[in-house]
């Protein structure tokens, strides 16, 4: 069956009797309705003409007699080619005015009455144009001339003539459009196509400023805007170019459908031939339009547009030939039913909108500078459209309309709101979105807000919603009509478009939308390529929707390795945070958690709530006084916003906790097994990264080297115990999963991963990590033995844990006597130095009651160490400064700090490093090593040093060369990364650095963001001294940041977790041994390390502690049934979809 909606022999739009059972009554009703609509439309358009003719409403009083004399002397101007578009625009402005009003007054039966009405309309239009021209004398800078009056009179006459030529036919056409999905479904589509084609051609040739002389033609052809392939000068950016070319393809689709619908030859042509003919017709049309562009003064002609129109027409013909009507309708309905697809599109849409708006994410102004621009914004509607050309105004209008139409489509897609309410909601949503983006332009120096876009956005979103309702009404009867031919299936499930949205718990949709918006921002601003990030997250969201429990596996698996901060330069929010944003956005929207059977006990809930309050207060204290969001806000640990970075771990845990309870309600034992499997995969991934690091740098079995691995934990660029803390938390779950899984191959995999984890822990050379892991394994074995003795499972688990612990001890003995021996021999002196460091941290705190109770605030330790530490070590500093639009790096001296970037340098080559610098100190110097380096340790460095001297505040250009002949070649699997570092060795100096460039001998630029205009993007930093960045004691860190209150609440929280685990130690569905081992080992390791400096570890710890405190509350059978109904919407949707498809399957 061919596309029944488009079969020519079913409906001809010029025969109104095909649409109605009673022609005369239907036509009368349609005429009356359309007359009323035309009256409203005419009044609205009249107001628009008057308003648009007087913008910018700069009223200047004139004496009426003087004004009348001036009006009597208005000239007839000799208009050049530059003013022709404006003159033609006046003609076009009045054509719709008289066309609409002719339709309003021409409903009389007698011809004489209709002619009289048209003459009255013409007289009123002439009076209007003369009156407006007179009024423009009071509104400079409007131009008053006889040319405008002539053009407006011509447009008025043309509108009346056009109505008498087509008006009688317009009534059934418009009635068909309004009928939509009822009796006029086929007529509606045919009418829409019939109206679309002339509108398409008219817009393609607007503003019709045709050249009329050979001189004008020569000037037009010599302006350089045209291109045989692609005229890039016609677009603001490559993104806009891609969008416009895509739109050209989409806008040409109806042309191919129109050709098949109205051309008999196409209907009789075989499918392949018709598509080829449509391609050829589209190409001919494209050639015609692009050729005509050469005769338009404002036109742009390019060969690519010929191909896009041909492709669009061909695709339209292909769809028309091969897509049956009922299948198209069913696809539309089922697509609307799959509302979850809309959620991953929201961040992509917002990111694309930011890209098309021209946002430069690292050129944000601060609040004060942005608000200073606000008085210069003109809020008068269409103010800025007046001060540009007609073509630019039209392009801006349609671009803005298309940009803000998607909210209307998404709202229709995701809700079952009635048409009028949906249009109102869409208008509000479009206006709010446009307001946000227009307000954001205040913070972009190169952009200016246009409040008119708020009105356009509201109208566009509402129009898009109306269009989707019209399509829904038009397409739905196709399936309903098809079902009449299958009586056996007439009682099928109601159409999804008519079903109510059963989603509850709307409160969870607010954080879902917030997370989706933040994710869109992150994608748009991602420095390593937004397309890769968007594609990866979209794939993850598809997996998560198909298997809603997938986050239990993928999130813990990604936690230790999804970290590209050394490449991106982003360490306040990284790829793992984006993964969590995607998880929460989809899960909260698609499966909003309801009332759970797993809850915290009242005492635990009270302690947890109070601790959350303490933590939030500490974050607010640390972030105050909330400085402006400049380029340094999220690029330095000295920033007050470091409090947000450190506090996000607890926030993520709290946001994931409802999802965890959701999965535990479904099947607690299975959920815990999945989580443990995810932890096993995470240890496997972390171990793999450690293997690469060991193979590439010291060697896999070189235990005499002092090289300490960091894996993919970029937070260790300032030292710390991130990797060992992660292994302490994760290894008990690896052991538990390995000893409880049934399949032999799975057990072998688990044992291998555990061995890999032990190796990774050994090569950290972290004494505290060894002790904490060993303690955790002991706790695992003891907790397993405390379980029900009637089962052999706990005994096997305890025995297996003991064997694995023995293996860990054996590994320790293997390396004993090498570098590890040196580490243990200095334990006493290291502990003494650590104690002195703790004392110094306490001395840095304010000496008042408030600080003692509530702490100094989260994330403030690095900044306070810089100014208050008594250890005699001044850490180096860095920051970005901006002056007259130029941004540079200010690098201070002190304890070694290296600003570095990974570069693709090859051996046996020569490279030139050049940069601009200045220094106020005569001893200014920069050291520039090019080293093989991953995070902390450097090898085979090629170092250069540049003495800046006294530059008196003036920029000077410096350059050095690197000869990489001495860099050794390595196997592909042992390739080392190379980093170019910048280091200021003089503590009392600050060096300003800008325009850094590393050129290869063949002229390739190897550095990215060398001008630092994007802040820290693509740059990273590392230090040789970890003490300025960490307190190195978890308990002291809590006291420093949250005070005695926070420390006490955390201790109670830990006790509550232990008590809860003890009460449920015989619950076979709960991995009590693994939880107890992980938590105890982590807290033990915290005696020597400030582990909450790493948000990922905070997330993991608090999530485990929360799950340990959860207890099962009894529920009624009815509640259980309700929960199951709420917990598996995806499965219900699948069943309904299958029943629906079976009911309406084509034969």
Image (tube, grey):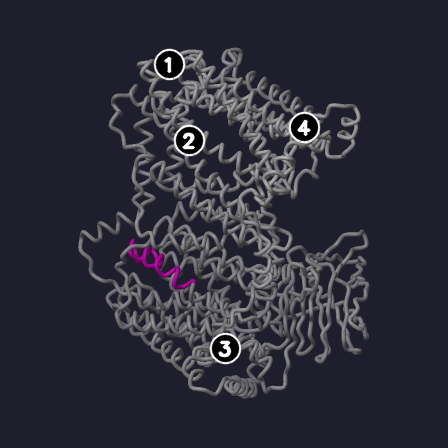
Magenta-colored span: 652-672
| Distance Cα–Cα, label 2 vs label 3 | 73 Å
Circle 2 sits on which residue?
40
- Of residues 1138 and 1011, the one nearer the viewer is 1011
Q: Are marks 1 and 4 in contact (CB under 8 Å)?
A: no
For the stretch drawn in magenta, the main secondary structure is helix
Q: Secondary structure at mark 2?
A: helix
Q: Is residue 506 above or below residue 153?
A: below
| Distance Cα–Cα, label 3 vs label 4 | 74 Å
For the question of whether residue 300 can be seen, the reply is no
Circle 1 sits on which residue?
18
Mark 3 packing: few (<14 Cα in 10 Å), some, or many (20+)? Answer: many
Q: Nearer the viewer, mark 1 or mark 4?
A: 4
Q: Secondary structure at mark 3?
A: loop
Residue 468: percent from left, percent from top: 42, 33
- Of residues 1061 and 221, the one nearer the viewer is 221
Q: Is residue 512 left or right of residue 499?
A: right
N-terminal of the pair, mark 1 or mark 2, is 1
Circle 3 sits on which residue?
1089
């Amino acid at each position: 069956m061919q596309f029944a909606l488009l079969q020519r022999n079913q409906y001809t739009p010029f025969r109104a009797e095909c649409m109605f059972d009673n022609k005369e009554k239907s036509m009368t009703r349609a005429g009356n309705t359309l007359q009323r609509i035309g009256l409203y439309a005419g009044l609205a358009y009249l107001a628009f003409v008057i308003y648009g003719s007087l913008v910018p409403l700069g009223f200047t009083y004139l004496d009426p007699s003087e004004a009348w004399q001036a009006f009597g002397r208005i000239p007839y101007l000799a208009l050049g080619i530059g003013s022709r578009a404006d003159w033609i625009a006046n003609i076009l402005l009045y054509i719709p005015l008289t066309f609409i009003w002719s339709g309003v007054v021409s409903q009389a039966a007698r011809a004489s009455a209709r002619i009289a009405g048209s003459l009255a309309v013409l007289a009123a239009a002439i009076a209007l144009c003369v009156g407006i021209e007179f009024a423009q004398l009071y509104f400079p800078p409007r131009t008053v001339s006889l040319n405008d009056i002539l053009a407006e009179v011509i447009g008025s006459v043309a509108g009346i003539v056009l109505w008498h030529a087509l008006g009688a036919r317009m009534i059934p056409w418009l009635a068909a459009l309004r009928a939509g999905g009822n009796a006029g479904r086929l007529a509606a589509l045919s009418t829409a196509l019939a109206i679309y084609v002339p509108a398409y051609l008219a817009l393609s040739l607007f503003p019709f400023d045709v050249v009329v002389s050979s001189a004008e033609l020569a000037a037009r052809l010599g302006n350089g805007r045209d291109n045989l392939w692609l005229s890039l000068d016609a677009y603001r950016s490559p993104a806009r170019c891609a969008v416009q070319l895509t739109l050209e393809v989409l806008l040409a689709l109806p042309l191919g459908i129109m050709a098949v619908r109205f051309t008999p030859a196409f209907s009789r042509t075989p499918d392949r031939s018709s598509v080829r003919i449509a391609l050829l017709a589209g190409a001919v049309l494209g050639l015609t339009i692009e050729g005509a562009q050469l005769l338009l003064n404002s036109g742009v002609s390019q060969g690519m547009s010929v191909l896009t129109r041909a492709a669009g027409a061909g695709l339209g013909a292909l769809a028309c030939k091969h897509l049956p009507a009922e299948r198209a309708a069913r696809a539309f309905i089922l697509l609307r039913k799959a509302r979850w697809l809309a959620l991953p599109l929201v961040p992509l849409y917002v990111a694309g909108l930011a890209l098309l708006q021209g946002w430069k994410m690292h050129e944000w102004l601060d609040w004060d500078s942005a608000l200073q621009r606000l008085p210069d914004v003109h809020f008068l509607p269409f103010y800025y459209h007046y001060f540009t050309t007609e073509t630019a105004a039209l392009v801006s209008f349609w671009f803005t309309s298309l940009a803000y139409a998607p909210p209307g489509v998404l709202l229709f897609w995701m809700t079952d709101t009635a048409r009028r309410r949906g249009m109102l909601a869409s208008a509000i949503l479009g206006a709010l979105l446009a307001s946000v983006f227009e307000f954001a332009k205040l913070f972009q120096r190169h952009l200016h807000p246009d409040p008119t876009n708020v009105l356009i956005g509201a109208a566009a979103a509402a129009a898009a919603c109306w269009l989707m309702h019209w399509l829904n009404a038009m397409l739905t009867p196709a399936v309903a009509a098809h079902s009449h031919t299958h009586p056996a299936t007439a009682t099928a499930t109601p159409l999804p478009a008519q079903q109510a949205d059963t989603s509850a718990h709307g409160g969870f949709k607010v954080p879902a939308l917030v997370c989706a918006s933040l994710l869109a921002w992150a994608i748009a601003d991602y420095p390593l390529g937004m397309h890769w990030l968007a594609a990866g997250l979209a794939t993850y969201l598809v997996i998560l929707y198909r298997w809603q429990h997938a986050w239990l596996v993928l999130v813990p698996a990604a936690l230790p390795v999804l970290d590209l901060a050394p490449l991106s330069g982003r360490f306040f929010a990284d790829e793992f945070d984006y993964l969590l944003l995607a998880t929460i956005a989809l899960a909260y929207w698609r499966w909003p958690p309801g009332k759970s059977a797993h809850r915290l006990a009242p005492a635990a809930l009270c302690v947890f709530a109070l601790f959350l309050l303490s933590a939030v207060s500490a974050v607010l204290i640390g972030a105050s006084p909330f400085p402006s969001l400049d380029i340094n806000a999220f690029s330095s640990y000295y920033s007050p916003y470091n409090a947000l970075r450190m506090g996000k771990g607890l926030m993520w845990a709290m946001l994931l906790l409802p999802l965890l309870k959701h999965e535990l309600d479904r099947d607690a034992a299975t959920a815990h097994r999945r989580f443990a499997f995810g932890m096993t995969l995470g240890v496997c991934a972390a171990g793999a990264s450690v293997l690469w690091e060991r193979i590439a740098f010291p060697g896999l079995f070189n235990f005499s080297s002092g090289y300490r691995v960091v894996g993919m934990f970029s937070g260790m660029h300032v030292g710390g115990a991130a990797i060992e803390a992660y292994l302490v938390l994760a290894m008990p779950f690896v052991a538990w999963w390995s000893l409880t899984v049934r399949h032999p191959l799975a057990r072998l995999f688990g044992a291998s991963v555990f061995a890999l984890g032990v190796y990774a822990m050994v090569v950290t050379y972290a004494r505290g990590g060894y002790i904490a892991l060993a303690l955790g394994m002991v706790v695992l074995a003891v907790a397993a033995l405390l379980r029900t003795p009637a089962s052999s499972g706990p005994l096997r688990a305890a025995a297996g844990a003991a064997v694995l612990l023995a293996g860990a001890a054996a590994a320790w003995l293997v390396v004993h006597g090498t570098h590890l021996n040196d580490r243990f021999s200095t334990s006493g002196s290291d502990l003494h130095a650590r104690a002195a460091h703790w004392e110094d941290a306490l001395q840095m705190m304010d000496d008042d009651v408030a600080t003692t109770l509530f702490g100094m605030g989260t994330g403030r330790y690095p900044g306070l160490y810089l100014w208050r530490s008594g250890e005699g070590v001044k850490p180096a500093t860095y920051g970005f400064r901006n002056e007259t639009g130029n941004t540079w790096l200010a690098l201070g001296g002190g304890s070694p700090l290296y600003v570095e970037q990974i570069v693709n340098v090859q051996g046996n080559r020569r490279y030139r490093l050049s940069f601009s610098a200045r220094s106020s100190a005569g001893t200014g110097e920069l050291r520039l090593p090019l080293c093989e380096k991953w995070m902390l340790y450097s090898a085979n460095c090629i170092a250069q040093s540049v003495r800046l001297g006294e530059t008196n505040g003036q920029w000077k250009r410096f350059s050095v060369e690197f000869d990489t002949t001495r860099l050794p070649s390595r196997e592909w699997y042992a390739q080392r990364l190379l980093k170019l570092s910048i280091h200021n060795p003089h503590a009392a100096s600050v060096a300003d650095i800008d325009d850094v460039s590393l050129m290869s001998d063949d002229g390739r630029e190897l550095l990215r963001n060398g001008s630092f205009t994007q802040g820290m993007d693509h740059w990273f930093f590392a230090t040789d001294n970890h003490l300025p960045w960490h307190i190195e004691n978890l308990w002291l860190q809590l006291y420093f940041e949250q005070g005695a209150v926070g420390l006490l609440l955390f201790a109670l929280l830990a006790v509550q977790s232990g008590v809860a685990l003890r009460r449920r130690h015989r619950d076979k569905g709960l991995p009590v041994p693994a939880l107890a081992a992980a938590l105890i080992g982590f807290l033990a390791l915290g005696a020597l390390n400030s582990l909450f400096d790493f948000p990922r570890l905070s997330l993991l710890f608090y999530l485990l502690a929360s799950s340990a405190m959860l207890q099962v509350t009894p529920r009624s059978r009815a509640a259980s049934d309700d929960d199951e109904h709420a917990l598996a919407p995806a499965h219900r949707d699948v069943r309904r979809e299958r029943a629906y498809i079976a009911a309406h399957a084509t034969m």
